[in-house]
Amino acid sequence: MNTRIPGAARFVTDDGRVFVQTSGGSNYRNFPDVPFDATLEPGALGSTFLRLGPRLRVRVISNDQR
């Protein structure tokens, strides 16, 4: 996770893909220490979510789509 983008977290997967947070504001207290395990899940209308455990889900967009 890289938080240099103002107001959003940037996540880099183990295969090098980059995703940027688009929801939830900048509440970094809920993110675990890096590196952490997470899964990417499809959402409605082509959206993508990064799931960190059973309760935390963050909407993200691929850096390629920005």
Image: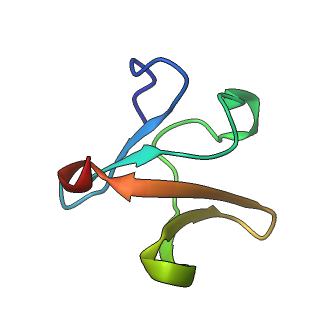
Q: Position of residue 35 (x, y in %)?
A: 45, 44
> With respect to residue 14, does 54 lie above or below?
below
Given residues 61 and 12, the one toward you in this image is 61
Where residue 22 appears, as percent x and y from the top left, is: 52, 45
Q: Position of residue 64 (x, y in %)?
A: 18, 53
The quadrant of the picture occupied by the N terminus is: top left
Occupied quadrant, residue 11? top left
Q: What colour scheme has been applied to the protein in the rendered image?
A: rainbow
Q: Is residue 24 above or below residue 19?
A: above
Taking 11 as reference, is 51 left or right? right
Image quadrant where residue 7 sits = top right
Please give the name of the residue rendered at 72% of the width and 30% of the height, measured from the top-left corner.
Answer: 27
Q: Depth check: give the residue in front, 55 or 61.
A: 61
| Residue at image point 39% right, 17% down | 4
Q: Is residue 46 left or right of residue 66?
A: right
Which residue is pictured at 47% across the width and 17% down the height?
6
Tell me: 63 left or right of 38. Answer: left
Camera-side residue: 24 or 38? 24
Q: Is residue 47 visible?
A: yes
- Give the tally of numbered discs: 0
- Residue at the right extreme? 55
